[in-house]
Image (cartoon, grey):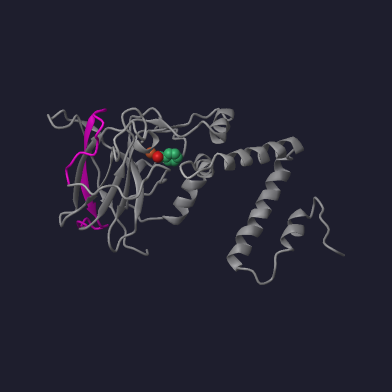
Amino acid sequence: MPNFFTEADSVNAVNARVGADINPRLREVMTSLVRHLHAFVKDVHLTQQEWEMAIDFLTRTGQICSAERQEFILLSDTLGVSMLVDAINHRRPLGATENTVLGPFHVAGAPQREMGSCISFDGKGESCLFEGRVTDLHGNPVKDARLDVWSDNAEGFYDVQQPGIQPKWNNRGVFTTGVDGRYSFVGIKPVSYPIPHDGPVGRMLEALGRHPYRPAHMHFIVTAPGFEKVVTHTFVGDDAYITSDAVFGVKETLVAPFERVDDGRTIWRSPFDFILTPDGE
Ligand code: BEZ
Ligand code: FE
C-alpha cells in the first residue's frame, strides 16, 4: 500500500519521505520536529483560521527583520527557547559564572579602555563602580581576561538605538585584566527597559497579557585564553521586573549587590567576580 497521508498516520507519512543518505543529525532534528509539530496541532485541534493567523504572524515576523532588527530571535527569547538552548549547551560546575542571553545590542569592536575608566559619556544616570576579579574555579586570578561590557543609558536605551542622540560607544567598553585578575570601570546603575515591542512579538506579548520589560542589568562577555567564553549579565536585585524578565534571562547567581556608597567618586558600587571554567569541559 502506498503511504498516503492520513490524520492518524500523518507523522509517518512525512518522515517516511526522508532520504536514506542524508546527514544523520538533520534526520534526527527534522523527524523529531515533525513529530512534535503534528502532536501539537492535534493536541490543540488547530483550526483553519488559527493556522492562517500563525502563517500571517510568521510572515510579519520575517518582514520586520533587518540588519538592525531580528524579530525571530526576539520570538525565541520571549518563548524561553534562547535561554533553554543556552542552558543545555552551557552546563557548568557549581560556582562557575552562569550564562544568559546575548541580546541584540552587543556591538563588536568597542574601544579598549583603561582599567577603572568611565564608559558613560552622556552625563545621565547615577554613577556606579563595577569591580571584581576574574578567577578560575579554584580562586586563582585569570590574567589577560577580556571583559566586553555594555548597558543601556539612564533612559533605558542603548547607544545603537539612539544614533546621533547618544555619544558613540556610550556605556560600552573593553577591559583586560592583569596578573591580579582584577577589573574595574565606572558606568551607571542600569535601569529596566522594554525589549523592542512595536512588532509582531510585541503584539503577541500583549495578547498573552505579558509585559515587555527586562530588569536592569549590565552585560558582560568574558573571554580568556584556555577558558570557556561567558556571555552574561549582572542584575539589579530590587528591580520591579526581577522575577518577570520578558526573556527569562535572570538567574539567581547573577543578581549582584548594588551598594550605595556616595564616596565622592560614584553613587553606587557593584562588586561581582567572574569564575571561569577551563575550555572544552
Ligand atoms: C538585552 O538585554 O539587551 C536583550 C536581550 C534579549 C532581547 C532584547 C534585549
Ligand atoms: Fe540588555
Query: Can I make out residue 248 in this image?
Result: no
From the viewer's perspective, tell me whether residue 178 is left or right of residue 72: left
Q: Is residue 247 above or below residue 208?
A: below
Q: Is residue 77 above or below residue 244?
A: below
Please report the residue visible at 22 percent of the width from the left and 58 percent of the height from the top: 144
Task: Report the residue at 67% width, 41% height from top.
Answer: 55
Is residue 241 in sight in this rendering? yes
Q: Judge by depth and name the residue closer to the eye, 198 or 98.
A: 198
What residue is rendered at 62% in x and 41% in y? 58
Q: Quadrant of the C terminus?
A: bottom left
Q: Quadrant of ligand 2?
A: top left
Could you tell whether 136 is left or right of 33 in the image?
left
Number of residue marks? 0
Q: Quadrant of residue 24 in the image?
A: bottom right
Residue 150 location (% of width, % of height): 31, 41
Q: Is residue 264 left or right of residue 257?
A: left
Boundaries of the magenta span: 115-142
The percent position of residue 227, horizontal first and vertical second, equals 30, 60
Q: Is 68 covered by the magenta stretch?
A: no
Give the main secondary structure, helix, strand or loop, of the magenta stretch: loop
Percent position (x, y) of residue 51? 71, 40
Say if the magenta span includes residue 134. yes
| Residue drawn at the location 36% of the way across and 41% of the way down | 252
Q: Which image quarter is the N terminus in?
A: bottom right
